[in-house]
Image (spheres, grey):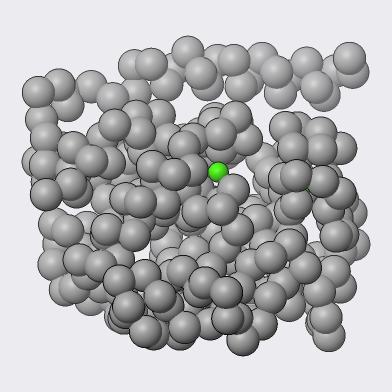
Amino acid sequence: MNKFIIIFAVLFSNSAIAAKNYYSNVEGLSGYQLKSALKIIISRTHKSQSYGALFHAYKETDRDTTYDGDGSIVDMYSENPNGKDPYIFNSPKKRCGNYKKEADCYNREHIFPQSSFSKGKPMRSDFFHVYPSDGYVNNRRGHLSFGEVGKVAIWTSKNGSKIGTNIFENVGNKVFEPIDEFKGDIARSLLYFATRYEDRIQSFHHEWLDGSRDRVYKGHFVRMLLKWHKQDPVSEHERNRNNRGYTFQKNRNPFIDHPEWVEKIWKK
Ligand SMILES: [Ca+2]
Ligand SMILES: [Ca+2]
């Protein structure tokens, strides 16, 4: 083990210990009271990092130590959890840049599109909803909502992420569907976002918003996020990313630490 790995191992084990004391004064709370109490905790501790710093952090925070364990960057839009990845990114030289097709380069994907909040701070560089992803797939997704496409896709990425018409509750809008392995990850990112920014989100614009501070998202969208949260439980990769993100940005995603809080807040 080299010195670098030992330093990170120590930092991350300290992170895990510190996380135990992270959620204070939320005992007995439920519903939107719990959400607002979490909002205070994750905002007070949030040390916003620069947009450029994300790129530097990814080589550690998003390192593949659980799927292939090859140390390359986990990209939800190209990772194949059941076999060989169609392509991998493991060099800073692969940062976008221009791209013409998948595998050309990676950039920073905002799960909650940055156009929705005019690239404002600290949302734009908030680690818990900004992930490294293939530039071409990121661009195809654009600011589309998420949904379930079913069998008839307009377009499919090399790992099976799809664009097409949303069949979830027959909503019928044009959506992006990630692969099953990452549906929960994306749901928990969006629920983090709804909590962290509940005081500002009424001025943001996206078709999935219902204009409220408490529930934040439209009914069908909340029901789909709850479904995704349940069918794709927190993985070891996600827990690692949460701990590494805590080292980087000093706050945490409560719904990775306490998956049971999702239903406690949103289930009606
Ligand atoms: Ca991989
Ligand atoms: Ca997952």
40 or 261: nearer the eye? 261
Picture quadrant of residue 168: bottom left
Q: Is residue 217 above or below residue 208?
A: above
- Who is closer to the viewer here, 81 or 97? 81
Residue 171 can be seen in this image: yes
Residue 149 x %, y % = 50, 74
Residue occupying image coordinates x 23% and y 76%: 203
> On screen, 198 above or below 73?
below
Report the residue that reaches farthest toward the front. Answer: 151
Along the line of sight, which residue is nearer the eye, 138 or 243?
A: 138
Q: Is residue 31 left or right of residue 227?
A: left
Residue in view at x 60 percent, y 58 percent: 179
Point 77% across, 68% down: residue: 158
Give x and y (percent) for residue 222: 27, 60
Q: Position of residue 145 (x, y in %)?
A: 43, 75
Image: 18 above or below 175: above
**Image point (49%, 35%), residue name:** 234
Eyeballing the image, is 234 above or below 16? below
Is 43 on the left-hand or right-hand side of 253?
left
Residue 263 x %, y %: 23, 41
Report the number of discs.
Answer: 0
Q: Quadrant of the N terminus?
A: top right
Q: Quadrant of ligand 2?
A: top right
Residue 55 shows up from this direction: no
